[in-house]
Image (tube, rainbow, N blue to C red):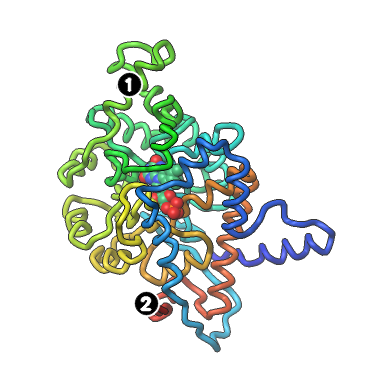
Amino acid sequence: MTRRFGDFQNEIYGDGLRGRLPRYPVDFDSLERTAAAVLPSWIWSYVAGGCGDEHTQRANVAAFRKWGIVPRMGIGEYERDLSVELFGMALPSPVFLAPVGVMGICTGDFHGDLVAARASERTGVPAIQSTLAMDPLEVTGAVHRRTPGLFQLYTPTDRELAISLLQRAERAGYKAIVVTLDTWVTGWRPRDLNTANFPQLRGWCLANYFSDERFRAMLGRAPESDPAGAIHLWSRIFGKSVSWDDLTWMRESTSLPIVVKGVCRSDDVRRAIDAGADGIYCSNHGGRQADGGLPALDALPEVVAAARGLPVLFDSGVRNGTDVVKALALGATAVGLGRSYVYAAAAGGEDGLVHHLRSVLAEADLLMAVDGYPTIADLTLDAIRRVV
Ligand code: FNR
């Protein structure tokens, strides 16, 4: 499945000849600055912030600078093929949108989950929709037609509610379940604590709960008639500390592939495989959950080695197409964007997000062209070297 992602730069230069400049920047730093200027401060600090003194968050980004791609010449190949297969799905590229639980409030219309789904459709980049959303999963699921959507589960303490969410996701057409393991309790986040701000406790992004029959039955009345009671119930049932045994009942509740998110060590990979996981998602939640941790990229080779050929998704610190190529060379099957795409959507809505995804793909494609790695299969450990 060859797509000439790099041709995006010809479009940009061609527009320039007709006097048109790009409406959105192509680099992360500019997107970050623009998002900081347009987002209300309570949303900006929630998205941009992380855990503790944010050392891990910065280390995630810095870790990419410690690796370099080794150029290979004389390849004699004009085309690249960035396509990958994931759980039987043929995808045009290995990039995906990581789940972001406040995506819904990061666009001016407060329907950011739909913006992500629509941009996903337009670019072929799959989106993982979070449990925490402004629009119910059925509404976002209906947008995903050509490009698959995946559903991320925050496992509630009530098993019936968890099963209800899993089955709703399957009925809505999602193609895989991502179970996040590292967030049954929120990490210590100074930016949010100093402003006493946690958006969900103010009722934002709870549509999947409020629309759920089991949740409504637990509440005993319509959430709309008692928002404070509904938020209180949500806060009590939000986070189950998932054990490997829980994968058994999850498996029995859905026929979709199950990916476990937040895995950074080889023994956990083995336990996940033994418990029946279909994929491993190496991530430290972008440094939002635990400070003082290892950059997720440093854990990737160990996770890949232990995964014994199972797909390994990766995120945390990915800022551009070059980072995508490095994570692929270190063994990731697919690479997720987090804050970068939130900033792009905040800065320019659906078109801004499409522009960002096309930029990331173009940069990855052109790097592979220049450095002589025409396919993802060429990007092995041989293609990358530690520089520090
Ligand atoms: C997240 N992340 C996240 N993960 C998840 O499994 N479910 C969720 O609802 C959320 N919500 C969320 C909100 C915000 C504001 C951010 C920034 C992140 C984590 C996300 O999926 C991913 O792991 C990180 O964003 C990757 O790190 P970078 O790329 O943002 O550095």
x then y, percent, for residue 274: 16, 54
The vertical placement of 211 against 340, above or below, is above
SS at circle 2: helix
x then y, percent, for residue 158: 23, 28
Q: Name the residue under label 1.
A: 232
The vertical placement of 189 against 236, above or below, is below
Q: Which residue is drawn at 34% across and 46% down?
A: 178
User: Quick check: can you spot residue 73?
Assistant: yes
- In the rendered structure, the answer to whether residue 182 lies left or right of residue 29 reads left
Give the quadrant of the C terminus: bottom left
Along the line of sight, which residue is nearer the eye, 308 or 48?
Answer: 48
Mark 1 Cα within 10 Å, few/some/many (few <14, many 20+)? some
Marking on residue 381? 2
Along the line of sight, which residue is nearer the eye, 226 or 249?
Answer: 226
Along the line of sight, which residue is nearer the eye, 296 or 359?
Answer: 296
Confirm or deny contact between disc 1 and disc 2 (CB under 8 A): no
Q: Residue at x 58, y 66 (%)?
A: 363
User: Farthest bottom residue?
Assistant: 74
User: Quick check: can you spot residue 99?
Assistant: no
x then y, percent, for residue 103: 49, 39
Q: Which amino acid does label 1 sit on?
A: His
Marking on residue 121? none
For the image shown, how many numbered marks are present on the structure? Answer: 2
Q: Which residue is drawn at 56% across and 60% down?
A: 360
